[in-house]
Image: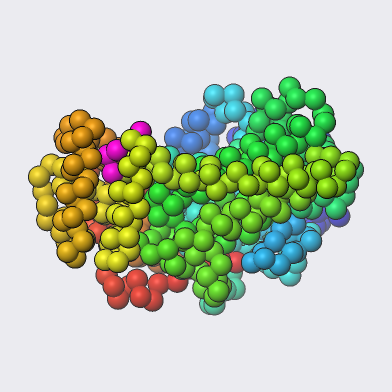
Amino acid sequence: MPAPSDSPTRTSSVITGVESTFADRLSPLTVPWRGADVPEPKLLVVNEDLATQLGLDVVALRSADGVAILSGAAAPTDATPVATAYAGHQFGGYAPLLGDGRALLLGELIDVDRRRVDLQLKGSGSTPFSRGGDGFAVVGPMLREYLVSEAMYALGVPTTRSLSVVATGRGIHRTGIEPGAVLARVAASHLRVGTFEYAARRPELLRPLADYAITRHFPEIVELPEGGDRYIAFLEAVLDRQAALVAKWMLVGFVHGVMNTDNTTISGETIDYGPCAFIDAFDPSAVFSSIDRGGRYAFGNQPAVLKWNLARFAETLLTLIGAEPDEAIDAATAVLSTFDDRYNRYMAEGLLAKIGLAGAVGENDLVDDLLIVMKDDRADWTGTFRALADELRGQHSPLTALIPSAHREPWLHRWHAALDRLGRDPHRTADAMDRVNPLYIPRNHNLDAALRSATAGDMTPFKQLLAAVTHPFEDRAGWEHYAAAAPETFTGTFQTFCGT
Ligand code: AMP
Ligand code: MG
C-alpha cells in the first residue's frame, strides 16, 4: 500500500547512518510509510545521555531539522521508514492483524558500544494498520512512557528507552481535545511474540524471522546447526530473559497493565508503557488499568500471564522445532516447564538482596514471611525496604510507621539473628540494601500531577520528577515528597488508561 500523497517527503540529515536490516530481510512484515505532517512542532524533552549513547549530535537534534525527524515530519536522508505487521493475543483473545497502527520504524542505529538498536516514532499518524484509529498520540501518555521507561532503565530493569517527546500542535480527539505528541523510542528491537504469531501463519516467513531474531539477540545460538535444537535453544533463551524481566518488575513493584503477546518482546525488554503503574501498598491483586476489569494483568498475576504468553510463543516455533508434531510439542513443553523454577530463582535472589541477605540461600522463609506481614499491613512496597535499612542504622520509626502490627517485632528478631549468624555488618549491609532498593519511583500521584501540568503547558514538575526517578537510589534533600506514598484518597480512585 503506498504512502498517502498528501504526507510530506521532507528529509533531514541530522540523523545519518540509519540501517534497515529488518525491512530488507523481512520486507513482507513491513510497509514503507511516512509520518503525518506536524503543524507546530515543539520539543518538550530530549534525552541527552541517550542521544550521546547513540552517537547523535544533541545540538542538531534540538534544531528545526532535528525536531522534524523526531516528530515524523521529515525522514532521515538515507532511511526507509516502515510500519510493521504483527498479530497478538489481547486479554486472551487472538487478533490476527494488529501492527504499527500509530508507529513508524525509522530504522536501526549502531550505538557507541556497537549495539544495533531500533529508532521508532509513536504517534506519528495513521498507517495501513490503524484499524480505524487516528494514528496519533497525546502529550500525557507519551510523557508517561518517556518518564517511566527512563525510570525503569535507572532501576536496572531491561527496557526500551525514550529519546524525545515532541508536541505536534495538533488537537487530538479523546475524551476532549488533547494536545498531540510524538515519542521517539529506542529498543533492542521491536520483535514481539506477536510478530511470531503473525509469521507462524505464513510459513515462508517463520524461519527467516526466527533466524533474524537469533542473530540480533542471541548470537551465541547462531553457531548451532539449523535443526530443531537451534529453535529449542532460542525458545529457552527468550524464556529465560523474560523470566528474569518479570522478576525485576515484581521486585520494583511494577504493574505493566497490558501484557498482551504483542507487548511481550523477544529481546527481553519491557515495552509499551500505556496503563502501567507502580504499587504503593503491597497487594498482589493490585490492578490500575481501567480496561482490565477481570484483573487478568494484576500485579501478582504477571509471572503466570507471562508464562501463558511464552506458551503462545512456543506454539509459533513448533514447525521449526521438529517435523513430528508430538515430538516438537514434548520438546517445547519441557522448556516451558522450566519457567517456574527460573522465575522463582530470580525472584528469590532479588528478594534476598533487598533484605541484605544477598547470596544467603536457605533464608527464603524469612522473605516469604516478610511478604505475608507486608500484605497484612498493606505496607508500602518501596518504602519498607528502605525502612529496613534504616532499622539497621538504629532508626526504628520509619518501619514502625509502615508495619505497625505486632507481627513486626518477631520477624525483625529472626532477621537480625540471620544477619548475625551470617556475619553481616549492619552498616555495610544497610548501604548495600540502599543500592538495590530505590527511594524514588514514579509514584502514581506524583506522575499524575506532573502529566496534568505538562498537558496544561508547564513542564517544570515533569522535569523535577524525571530528575528524581532517574537517580532512584540517591537520597537528596528537597526530594522527600517523591519518596512518600500517595494519600489513601488518591490511591482509592486512581486508574490508568491505555492512552489511545
Ligand atoms: P497498544 O495497546 O499501545 O499496545 O496498542 C495495541 C494496538 O492498537 C497496536 O496495533 C497499536 O498500533 C494500535 N493502536 C493503539 N492506538 C492507536 C491509535 N490511536 N491509532 C491507531 N492504532 C492504534
Ligand atoms: Mg503495543
Q: Residue at x 27, y 70 (%)?
A: 487
Q: Residue at x 66, y 25 (%)?
A: 220
In magenta segment, residue 358: yes
* 309 or 368, nearer to the observer: 368
Residue 391 against residue 131 in the figure, above or below = above
* 8 or 172, nearer to the observer: 172
Q: Quadrant of residue 485?
A: bottom left
In the figure, is residue 136 to the left or right of 477? right
Q: Is residue 84 visible?
A: no
Q: Is residue 481 visible?
A: yes
Residue 65 against residue 227 in the figure, above or below = below
Q: Residue at x 29, y 38 (%)?
A: 357
Residue 262 against residue 319 in the figure, above or below = below
Image quadrant containing the C terminus: bottom right
The number of numbered badges drawn on the structure is 0
Q: Position of residue 253 (x, y in %)?
A: 40, 55
In the figure, is residue 116 to the left or right of 383? right
In magenta segment, residue 181: no
* 309 or 467, nearer to the observer: 309
Residue 169 against residue 80 in the figure, above or below = below
Q: Position of residue 389 (x, y in %)?
A: 21, 44
Q: Residue furthest left?
A: 394
Chief secondary structure of the magenta portion? loop
Q: Residue at x 71, y 54 (%)?
A: 312
Which colour scheme appears in the figure? rainbow
Q: Position of residue 179 (x, y in %)?
A: 52, 65
Give the magenta part as a residue range.
355-359
Image quadrant containing the N terminus: bottom right
* 299 or 492, nearer to the observer: 299
Q: Position of residue 393 (x, y in %)?
A: 13, 42
